Image (cartoon, rainbow, N blue to C red):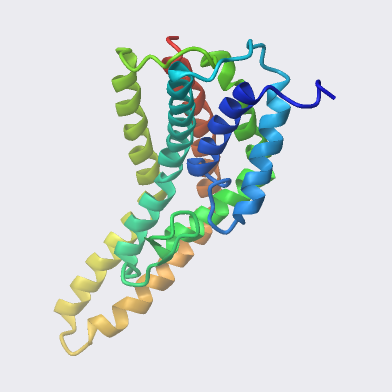
Amino acid sequence: MNELIPHLTVFLLVLVRVSAFFVTVPFFSYRTIPPQVKITLALVLAWIMYYTIDVEPLVFNDEYILLVMKEALVGLLLGLMGYIIMSAIQIAGSFIDFQMGFAIANIIDPQTGAQSPLIGQFFNMLALLFLLAIDGHHMILNGIYYSYQFLPMDQFPSFASESLPKFIMTTFTAVFAIAFQMAAPVVATLFLVDLALGITAKTVPQLNIFVVGFPIKIGVSFLVMFTMMAVMIQVIQKLITIMIYGIRDLMAILGGG
C-alpha cells in the first residue's frame, strides 16, 4: 500500500509542473475541454510520472515553497512557448482576413476566449486535427515527461544564459516568417485582384466597384486557399515540428545546456 501512495511533497511538485503546463500548452489548454477532465488528466499523469523520478523525499520548508513556484514557472514557460509558436496560424489568418474583408467578422477563439480572425480559426482547427492525426498530443505529453531530464526537480532554471535572448528572438522571427508563408499566396493574389479592380474602376466609372469587388475577392481567396491546401498542410506540419523542437530547446537552455 505504501508503494501506491506517493510522497506528498514530491508528488505535489510534479502535479504543479504538469498542471501549469496544461494551462498554456496548445490543445490541452482549450476552454472547451471541461476542467474536471484537465484536473483528472493532470493527477493521473503526475501520479504515473512520480514513479519515474528518482528524488529523495523533500521537507516542507521555505526552500520547498520556492521549488513549487519554480515548477509552476517552468510549466507555464514550456506551454507558453508552444502557444507562441502555434499563434503563427492566427497571425496568418489575420493577414488573409484583412485582405478579404473578413476582419469585421471575428469569432470567439475557444482556447483564449478572445476574438480571433475567421480564416485564422479555420486554420487553427485544421492544425488541431492534423496535430491529433500525427499523434502530436502524445509528443506534447512526452515533452513534459522528459522535461525532468533537462530541468531536474531540485534544480532552478538558468535565466542568466546568454543563449536565451537569442533563442527568443529566433523563435519570434520564425513565427512571423511561417505566418507570412501561409498568408503570402492569398495576400499576393488579392493584391493583384485589387490592382485589376482599380484599373476597372478607372476604365468603367459607371461600374460600382465596391459591390462587385467584395464577392470577387472572397471567391478568389477561397479558390486560392483550396488550390494551396496541400502547401498549407505542409506549413502546418513544419509549424508543429518547430513547436516540439522549440519546447525541447527551451528546456535545454533553462537547464543550462
Name above or below for residue 28 compared with residue 59.
Answer: below
Q: Dividing the picture into quarters, in which one does residue 145 lie? A: top right
Image coordinates of residue 231 in percent, x first then y, are: 51, 46
Foreground of the two, 173 or 49: 49
Image coordinates of residue 147 in percent, x first then y, are: 56, 21
Judged left or right of residue 46, residue 193 is: left
Name above or below for residue 50 compared with residue 16.
Answer: above
Q: Residue at x 51, y 23 (%)?
A: 248
Q: Dividing the picture into quarters, in which one does residue 98 lie? A: bottom left
Q: Dividing the picture into quarters, in which one does residue 41 lie? A: top right
Foreground of the two, 179 or 226: 179
Image coordinates of residue 176 in percent, x first then y, are: 33, 40
Q: Residue at x 24, y 73 (%)?
A: 197
Q: Residue at x 45, y 34 (%)?
A: 76
Judged left or right of residue 87, residue 191 is: left
Quadrant containing the N terminus is top right
Foreground of the two, 225 or 142: 142
Query: Outermost residue, right direction?
Result: 1
Residue 144 visible in the displayed image = no
Name above or below for residue 214 compared with residue 64.
Answer: below
Foreground of the two, 110 or 221: 110
Query: Outermost residue, bottom direction?
Result: 206
Quadrant containing the C terminus is top left
Judged left or right of residue 54, residue 198 is: left
Residue 127 visible in the displayed image = yes
Image coordinates of residue 151 in percent, x first then y, are: 51, 16
Q: How many marks?
A: 0
